[in-house]
Amino acid sequence: MLAKLTTKNQITLPRDVVKDFKGIEYFDAVVQDGRIVLEPVRIRPVAADLAGIRKKMERLGVTKADVTEAVRWSRKNTG
């Protein structure tokens, strides 16, 4: 199946390609080995599941100090 790139850098995916991704509006796009790979993403408001985000950060070992340092680094490297 072909998907054409438009002059606005948009690609319409064929219906047969996305039929198994009902309810998905966004895809994360990355380049791997010269190919474009799309991964479905479910967008949820942060406030709706803040406890879940905190649990995931704890599982990953992300500490308050890590977040503070990341914010400090980001602010220093913008602008």
Image (cartoon, rainbow, N blue to C red):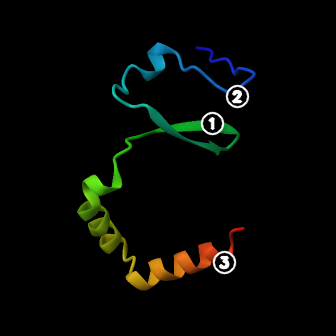
Quadrant assignment for the C terminus: bottom right
Relative horizontal placement of residue 73, taking residue 56 as reference (left or right): right
Which mark is first along the chain, 3 or 1?
Answer: 1
The correct choice, above or below, for 65 with respect to 41 in the image is below
Residue carrying label 2: 9
Q: CA distance from mark 2 to mark 1?
A: 13 Å
> SS at mark 1?
strand
Between marks 2 and 3 in the image, the one whose residue lies nearer the viewer:
3
Can you tell which mark lies on residue 51?
none
Q: Residues within 10 Å of mark 1 (few under 14, many from 20)?
A: few
Q: Quadrant of residue 10?
A: top right
What is the C-alpha distance between the residues marked 2 and 3? 32 Å
Q: Position of residue 25 (x, y in %)?
A: 43, 31
**Residue nearer the viewer, 62 or 68:** 68
- When asked about the image quadrant of residue 42, the answer is top left
Label 3 sits on residue: 76
User: Is label 3 in a helix, a strand or a loop?
Assistant: helix
- Name which residue type carries label 1: Ile
Residue tagged by mark 1?
A: 36
Measuring from the top left, give residue 18's x and y in whole percent.
44, 22
Decide if residue 68 is on the left or right side of residue 9. Answer: left
Q: Where residue 51 sits in the image (x, y, percent)?
A: 24, 64
Residue under the image location 47 percent in, 20 percent down: 17
Residue type at tag 2: Asn
Query: SS for tag 2?
Result: loop
